[in-house]
Amino acid sequence: MKRLFYALLLLPLLSFAQSYPVKPVRLIVPFPPGGTTDLIARVIQAKFQEHLGQSVLIENRSGAGGAIGATEAARAAPDGYTLLMVFDTHAINHHLYKSAPDPFKTLEHISLMVTSPSALVAVTSYAPNTLLEIVAHAKANPERVTYSTPGSGSSNHLAALILERYAGIKTTHIAYKGGGPMIQALLGQQVNITFMSAPLILPHIKSGKVKGIAVGGKQRMAQLPEVPTLGETYPGFEQISWFGILGPVGMPREVVARVHHETVRTLQAPEVRGKLVEQGFEIVASTPEEFLRHVQNESDKLGKLIRDNSIKVE
């Protein structure tokens, strides 16, 4: 009788999961249009909605390093009709912003979708052409080497702090209000160096507007075979950006499974995979459990870096 009772309780849930989705799905991108997260969302959009059988509407809700969009997603009904795409700031925002939702209590981790190496680049007017030359210049001129970021506590900022630790140098952080102004400052030769997502800066490296100094993956990028990895100079130094899809906590597990399944199918589709790989992304398509562990590890590691450097948001 107990089994029959529980089976009857599950019937509405199973029926809902089988019919999901019956209306358009909202995909929140917590950054402005034109950024890397937005780029990935628009690459997958057509195939993702084809697999789901409903329109997927991208909504850009930017601010506070992605925390504003994440908060909106966390407060949405946990019915699968609001999803969220995140960048690696997802693992650290709760260490920086009081308003940021707790990623482990308010959001359902569905899949770590793709990763990409970060790239250390320098402006063309800056004389050093290699990482060791930059380090030598920084040691000879303490705090004179400048780097741009879209704000304190951003992954770009943390990458520069990790470089300082590896190289034993001190540089000067110049924070801009977002990725757009940061890129404009770089292209306008207003700073010396910066760390950026490789796919986003790749066109500017290839056009010669900036110099590729190093990439953060284990291997050199096929698109930039002449640019060494950070690890070739400092073994163990990696800097990887990652992107994932989530929903509000409390989503029915059958709906989570459906979204996960269609996300993986989308990423494996030849036309989607081809576009992403061509632009420097690596397909991961992890399980929810793998994604959650990854975020927990990143939160622990980078949270300590934030505390050790007394980083405060501006």
Image (cartoon, rainbow, N blue to C red):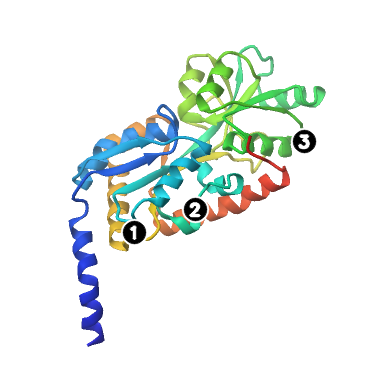
Disc 1 marks a residue whose amino acid type is Met
Q: Nearer the viewer, mark 3 or mark 1?
A: 1
Q: Amino acid at mark 3?
A: Gly
Q: Assign the C terminus to one quadrant of the image.
A: top right
Give residue 168's mark: 3
Real-space Cα separation, disc 2 to disc 1, in angstroms: 15 Å
Q: In the picture provided, is 72 more to the left or to the right than 172? A: left
Instruction: Indicate the quadrant containing the N terminus: top left, top right, bottom left or bottom right.
Output: bottom left
Label 2 amino acid?
A: Pro
Q: Residue at x 69, y 14 (%)?
A: 127
The residue nearer to you, when weighing 50 against 177, is 177
Helix, strand or loop for disc 2: helix
Task: Pick the residue in front: 302 or 239.
Answer: 302
On screen, 108 above or below 196?
below
Quadrant in the rendering for residue 48: top left
Viewer-nearest residue: 26 or 89:
26
Q: Which mark is residue 103?
A: 2
Residue 201 at what x, y percent from top left?
A: 50, 24
- Label 2 close to label 3 by CB (< 8 Å): no
Residue 275: percent from the left, percent from the top?
34, 31
Sequence order check, earlier mark of 2 and 1: 2
Q: Secondary structure at mark 1?
A: loop
